[in-house]
Amino acid sequence: MGVTNELTKMSKEQEKIADEIESLFKKLYAGKSAYSVGQIHGGEFFLRTEFALVVLTKHNEIRVSFSDRTRPSFAALISLLLEEIRGTSLIVCEDYETDEYGSMICDETDGSSTGEIVWDQKERYFKMLRDKMEHIIFRKTKGVPKKDG
């Protein structure tokens, strides 16, 4: 993950978690590296695939939203695997809409999709991804383990 500035700053623990998320998707996408490489922006880690959007927040919450084209069984598998990552809480968010090409729809009113975003508009892109994670369906928060004695 190497590069550090105010938009990419993450703790060592978050970097480790982000590496685990990338590792999971590398296994799911064997050989398709574009779908297993995330990006850091605003101190959060983003990984977007054709099936899911995953965001690791500053508070070690793994937020996941699935494409409306993702099979429920595959969504369940991804959720179960993400839930196993230590030191995190899993939050499953509402599914996101895609266009006929599988690109994420940015604006439901005008139908524009991520396929139309100019890639030098990073702030707009990451804000749109983060906005997709606002409607929570399920939250699995891991408590702090109790000490004996």
Image (cartoon, helix red, strand yellow):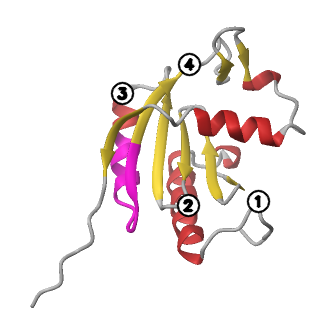
Identity of the residue drawn at 76% across and 72% down: 2
- At label 1, the amino acid type is Leu
C-alpha gap between disc 4 and disc 3: 15 Å
Q: Mark 4 packing: few (<14 Cα in 10 Å), some, or many (20+)?
A: many
- Residue indicated by mark 4: 97
**Sequence order check: which comes first, mark 1 or mark 3?**
1
Residues at marks 4 and 3 touching, judged by CB atoms closer than 8 Å: no
| Residue 87 in the figure: left or right of residue 126 | left
**Sequence order check: which comes first, mark 4 or mark 2?**
2
Indicate the secondary structure of the residue bearing disc 3. helix
| Residue 80 in the figure: left or right of residue 34 | left
Residues at marks 1 and 4 touching, judged by CB atoms closer than 8 Å: no
Question: Which residue is at the front of the view, 62 or 20?
Answer: 62
- Residue indicated by mark 3: 72
- Residue indicated by mark 2: 58
- Residue indicated by mark 1: 7
Identity of the residue drawn at 63% across and 56% down: 44
C-alpha gap between disc 2 and disc 3: 28 Å
